[in-house]
């Protein structure tokens, strides 16, 4: 391991990217809901964690070459599996959700069938929402599409009633709704449009499959006891 081998508490060196609210730097301090989960999981195994935020290409290079022990949050691809040992436990389901006012009714059937002709929607210009949703937007399958540059503008459009829906990353929406104190104004639809699992993965160059297995067991235990969800809830309530 690249950590401090002579230290009383061993250290795991991880790399990641700036990706609020999963990984975010504020006033020089690293935080984020994924950072909290990862740190707590390793703490249960008796490890300290050193986390470096890097451009994504450089982060991948470091785990590929063994300069770093692991990387998070990362999607699984066959190319990456060649040099990474992925956890079996999903770290987070990173999903796209609709956000709307409580008086807007949008059923799971409507979402699954992509039946959006009665709804106006606010999106962020040039952002991808997954292949199916991108196609629906391009083919004008909504009553009206507002393409703006900042997410808070979409929330204000919901508040005023100018737009009925806002498309967003689930946790990104949750963080912004809390930040703007709009929990009584809008809600996040519980039905996913598309979910993509993300993981922590360990460098094969460092031969850390045993540590990966220990991490999996600790994370599974945290999910079973409710501690995993409590970390998430605490983060968004801070």
Image (cartoon, rainbow, N blue to C red):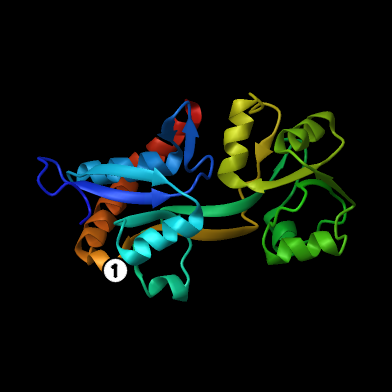
Q: Quadrant of residue 133?
A: bottom right
Crowding at label 1, few (<14), some or many (≥20) Cα neighbours within 10 Å?
Answer: many
Q: Secondary structure at mark 1?
A: helix
Q: Residue at left 30%, top 46%?
A: 222
Q: Is residue 168 left or right of residue 204?
A: right
**Label 1 belongs to which residue?**
204
Q: Is residue 148 left or right of residue 211?
A: right
Q: Is residue 118 left or right of residue 181?
A: right
Q: Residue at left 62%, top 40%?
A: 173
Instruction: Give how far across and how far down residue 155 sits, in percent.
Output: 74, 34
120 or 35: nearer the eye?
35
Instruction: Give how far across and how far down residue 94 sits, in percent.
Output: 54, 53
Is residue 73 shown above or below 102? Answer: below
Quarter the N terminus occupies: bottom left
10 or 117: nearer the eye?
10
83 or 65: nearer the eye?
65
Is residue 226 visible to us here?
no
Is residue 194 shown above or below 154? Answer: below
Q: Residue at left 27%, top 68%?
A: 205
């Amino acid at each position: 391991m690249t950590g401090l081998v002579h230290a009383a508490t061993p250290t795991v060196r991880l790399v990641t990217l700036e990706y609020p609210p999963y990984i975010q730097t504020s006033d020089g301090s690293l935080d984020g809901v994924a950072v909290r989960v990862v740190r707590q999981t390793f703490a249960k195994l008796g490890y300290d964690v050193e986390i470096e935020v890097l451009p994504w290409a450089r982060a991948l290079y470091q785990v590929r070459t063994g300069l770093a022990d692991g990387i998070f949050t990362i999607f699984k691809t066959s190319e990456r599996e060649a040099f990474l040992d992925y956890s079996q436990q999903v770290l987070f389901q990173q999903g796209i959700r609709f956000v709307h006012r409580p008086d807007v009714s949008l059923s799971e059937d409507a979402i699954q069938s992509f039946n959006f002709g009665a709804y106006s929607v606010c999106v962020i210009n040039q952002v991808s929402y997954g292949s199916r949703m991108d196609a629906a937007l391009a083919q004008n399958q909504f009553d009206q599409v507002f393409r703006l540059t900042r997410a808070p503008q979409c929330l204000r459009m919901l508040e005023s009633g100018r737009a009925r829906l806002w498309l967003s990353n689930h946790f990104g929406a949750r963080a912004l709704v809390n930040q703007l104190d709009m929990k009584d104004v809008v809600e996040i639809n519980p039905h996913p449009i598309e979910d993509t699992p993300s993981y922590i993965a360990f460098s094969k160059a460092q031969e850390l499959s045993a540590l990966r297995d220990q991490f999996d067991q600790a994370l599974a235990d945290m999910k079973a006891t409710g501690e995993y969800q409590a970390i998430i809830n605490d983060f968004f309530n801070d």
